[in-house]
């Protein structure tokens, strides 16, 4: 009887320890779910945005107007039937890094003008091109539809110019035809549902450099800064007005807010199943031990 009583006390201590560990795991799982859900759900009243660090100051608005539209430029390209197919409003700047004759890396900044020479293509149903020419530079943007046709995006940015452009001061390699493009690793810029216009007040940056197989010898790198961007392609509406707004997130990227909650729920289910399995195994194990001791 003394041995049995001592064994029962030890068994009781083990059970209490097991339940303590079980409760600790349960509480940890619940905290993980709450933390994950809180990360996925952003409450505007309690969310603070990090300050926007800008490469440049906005263009000086005209004296007669100090509103938002005064600092942005509007670009409208119409199809052959006269209907607007691409509409873009932005405060943009192109910054080009190059090397001068003193072997110094310097940057030259150029604002996107209010009235460039526009050209492009709006013939195919799944491909559109907008090209701006100004001060010896040619900036081209290729718009495409997604494979299912439910969304549009910019597939490629391309910037061409001469390294002898007077915009560059004492370039180390003049007389070169420079062609810079956006990375092929990022083929989808600003994805937006068809019929809606992309809107983002956060400054967006697109890096352009020479393709690896181009044989480029300029060594130039360009950054296109886009602020207060409002843009739409594949419009084909007689009104030529913006479609419903599709806003970018605070980080400038897109995320499914239901994903973190789903991951947290799956984690909770997995933990609870593990706990249940452990509890069942421990219950039958204790019963077996008790039965064996009674024998």
Image (tube, rainbow, N blue to C red):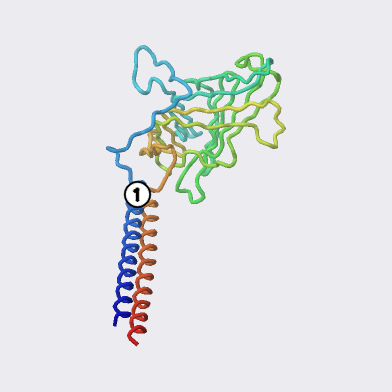
Crowding near the residue tagged with mark 1, few <14, some 14–19, many ≥20 C-alpha atoms within 10 Å: some
Of all residues, the one furthest to the left in this rendering is 45
Q: Residue 30 or 154: which is nearer the viewer?
A: 30
User: Seen in the image, is 151 located left or right of residue 258?
Assistant: right
Tally the marks.
1
Query: 212 or 136, which is in the foreground?
Result: 212
Give the residue furthest to the bottom.
Answer: 295
At x 47%, y 28%, the residue is 226
Quadrant in which residue 182 is drawn: top right
Q: Can you name the residue that lies furthest to the front here? A: 2
Give the residue pinned by disc 1.
Answer: 35
Element assignment for label 1: helix
Q: Quadrant of the C terminus?
A: bottom left
* Spot occupied by residue 134 in the image (x, y as percentages of width and height): 56, 20
The part of the image, by quadrant, that contains residue 96 is top right
Q: Quadrant of the N terminus?
A: bottom left
Q: Position of residue 129 (x, y in %)?
A: 54, 35
- Indicate left or right for 265 with 146 as reference: left
Instruction: Say which residue appears at 40% left-offset and 48% top-offset.
Output: 256
Q: Write down the quadrant of residue 240 in the picture.
A: top left
Relative depth, front residue between 69 and 242? 69
Q: Residue at x 52, y 37 (%)?
A: 122
Q: Is residue 100 above or below residue 120?
A: above
Closer-to-camera residue (97/279) = 279
Whole-percent x, y for residue 178 in the image: 66, 26
Q: Is residue 219 left or right of residue 111?
A: right
- Residue 108, percent from left and from top: 57, 19
């Amino acid at each position: 009887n003394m041995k049995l009583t001592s064994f029962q006390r030890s068994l009781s201590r083990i059970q209490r320890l097991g339940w303590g560990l079980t409760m600790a795991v349960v509480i940890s799982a619940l905290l993980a779910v709450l933390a994950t859900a809180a990360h996925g759900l952003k409450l505007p009243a309690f969310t603070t945005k990090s300050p926007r660090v800008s490469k440049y100051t906005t263009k000086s608005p005209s004296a007669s107007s100090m509103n938002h539209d005064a600092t942005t430029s509007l670009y409208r390209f119409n199809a052959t039937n006269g209907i607007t197919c691409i509409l873009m409003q932005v405060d943009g700047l192109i910054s080009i890094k190059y090397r001068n004759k003193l072997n110094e890396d310097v940057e030259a900044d150029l604002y996107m003008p209010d009235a460039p020479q526009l050209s492009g293509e709006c013939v195919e149903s799944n491909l559109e091109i907008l090209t701006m020419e100004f001060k010896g530079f040619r900036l081209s943007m290729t718009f495409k539809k997604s494979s299912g046709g439910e969304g549009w995006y910019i597939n490629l940015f391309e910037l061409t110019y001469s390294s002898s452009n007077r915009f560059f001061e004492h370039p180390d390699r003049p007389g070169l035809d420079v062609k810079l493009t956006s990375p092929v690793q990022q083929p989808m810029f600003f994805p937006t549902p068809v019929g809606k216009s992309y809107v983002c007040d956060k400054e967006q940056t697109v890096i352009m450099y020479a393709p690896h197989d181009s044989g480029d010898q300029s060594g130039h790198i360009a950054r296109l800064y886009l602020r207060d961007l409002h843009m739409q392609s594949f419009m084909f509406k007689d009104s030529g007005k913006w479609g419903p707004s599709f806003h970018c997130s605070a980080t400038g990227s897109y995320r499914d807010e239901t994903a973190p909650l789903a991951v947290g729920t799956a984690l909770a289910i997995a933990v609870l199943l593990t706990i249940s399995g452990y509890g069942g195994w421990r219950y039958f194990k204790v019963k077996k031990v008790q039965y064996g001791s009674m024998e």
